[in-house]
Image (cartoon, coloured by chain):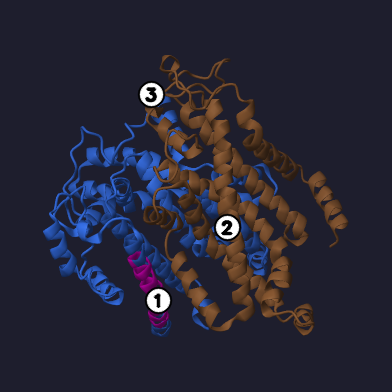
Amino acid sequence: MSNATLMRHAGFVLRSNVVTAIAAGAALLLVLTAIIGPLVIRYDPHSSNVSIALQPPSALHWFGTDQLGRDVLARVVTAARLDLAIAVLAVSLSFVVGAFIGALCGYAGGRIDRWVGRFVDVLMAFPLFVLAMAMVAALGNAVENIIYATAIINLPFYIRFARAEVNVRRGAGWVEAARASGHSHFEVVTRYLIPNVLPAMAVQISLNLGWAILNAAGLSFIGLGVTPPTPEWGIMVAEGARFITQGKWWLVGYPGLALMLTVLCFNLLGDGLRDILDPRMRQ
Amino acid sequence: MKPRALGLIARRTGRRFLSSVPALVGVVVFTFILMRVLPGDPAVFFASGPNAGKAEIEAIRSQMGLDKPMAEQLFYYVRDIGTGNLGRSLTTGQTVSKDLASRLPASLELTFVALALALTLAIPLGVLAALRPGSLVDHGVRLLCTLGVCVPTFVSGLLLIYCFYYWLGIAPDPTGRLDVFTTEPPRITGFLLIDALAAGDWEAWSAAARQLVLPAATMALFVLAPLARITRASMLAVLGSDYIRTAEGLGLSRPRIIIGYALRNGLLPVLTIAGIVFSTMLGANVLVEKVFSWPGVAAYALDALLSSDYAPVQGFVLLMATIFVIVNLTIDVLYGIADPRIGME
């Protein structure tokens, strides 16, 4: 499909599928919030003022204030950047590494394929969140290790996906043609096979982003990776958890809502992308 | 069932069991590597306490074989696991295997109740949605599924606490398995619901059940979506098949067709995703146990992890992976029994 046709098709799908259009708009808004949000907000997410601690939402503080009197809205908006960055970095890392390893396995087959297969089986034998937890513990309690851990637990899906997609294509005429015209095996994989399976994998990325955000927020909720006072949705919920039995719902509710809407938006977008790239999969 | 079929199942089970051995070996090796990578000295885990002297640690080091080559150490590690020696927790002072054994029932009780709750909600919802595709019920179920996977368990758990404990005041204090006024029934299985039943202590039973409702509901909500979705999809496929048309043509009653014929086949694919669901639940356990101060294995490992006490963490990871491998094996065997076509390869 040429670029122009793809764009026209995307436009058609967006027009006929309102939900995807809204999700795409929301995703854009989210990214914008992450980039320019911290510049627009009225309050400093770090400045505390105990005299206005634990105030419910008001005209002055739309999302209320937390136990140190910090503005919850400012913190929720500031956190968007970190949460999105963790998810995007983790997913792109596992996408790049997974696509490469998977394509290699699918192309080469044989011993490499078998060993990577074993490794993936072992990874999949762990409950994934537990594995991520153990890896953050092993690598050390830091934000970048949350990214690595989330990337590794995502890896099996990309490896399997790329492997299967490349495997069915490796015998294709154009692969042979690429070989015959003097490209090395490495070039065939990186310049022809991987770009060819990329569109199908793009759908996985969007669906995975939501999952990655849930995982990263879960890890910081249990006290791994991000440390207070850094604004991050998972840790904000963890801090607010102490006050939920006293009815201070906004400390948990707003970061929770942000998490939920973000994941919802990526999931809907993923479903929509699938429609655009593969109309046959439409339900 | 004919003896021949039983033999087939037994052979299949054996074969499947053998094929899960490499995964188990991989799990042990992986945990071993994690143990070596983890910050801190393994000898310290096994020492008498945090204040153990240098001489004692050195003695333990050579006693544990930590001065030996890696391959030999791996051998010792496997031997230790084989004899149930997972080290000692610094925080509780007990052996990790003992700690895990005493807390596992709490986690399992929560997981099983949540799974049962999720299934009793998801299957009827999925069937209802499949019976009238495109109807209001169908859209409602789809909305619930879409939202269900987006709400993190730790947020939904806290919001449930807000609603039912703070606002409506009908839920008990959301900490632990029993409120402070109830005495624990004598321990037989460690499952409070079963133990209280065995002791005939209805008060303890209802107290335990009341504590269990919110955490179980939290977990059930999270796995409701995949279960309801697959039930709907497979019921749709089954309801369109020839034998259902035949059953309708024979004039069988609607409930009999749906429950007696369609559902029996429609539930098969639900089994295939049960493994994924279980994996999700074991992970969600960590978060839910933290939210509800549930005294299970996950909360235990988490407390240990945050106080840099690594032996319990390794024991926990090993335990979770083993449970998961066993669950997958069981699902596979069940699938073979439920769908005889699989066994005929």
- Residue at 49% x, 80% y: name it: B343
Q: CA distance from mark 1 to mark 3?
A: 50 Å
The residue to which callout 1 is attached is: B22
Q: Is residue B147 visible?
A: no
Chain A colour in the picture: brown
Q: Earlier in the sequence, mark 3 or mark 2?
A: 2
Colour blue maps to chain: B
Predominant SS along the magenta part: helix
Q: Is residue A54 visible?
A: yes
Whether pointer 1 and pointer 3 mark residues with C-beta atoms closer than 8 Å, the reply is no
Q: Provide the chain ID for the residue under circle 1.
A: B
Q: Crowding near pointer 1: few (<14 within 10 Å), some, many (20+)?
A: some
- Residue B258 drawn at (x, y percent): 58, 58
Label 1, secondary structure: give it: helix
Q: CA distance from mark 1 to mark 2?
A: 28 Å
Query: Which segment did they paint magenta?
Result: B9-32
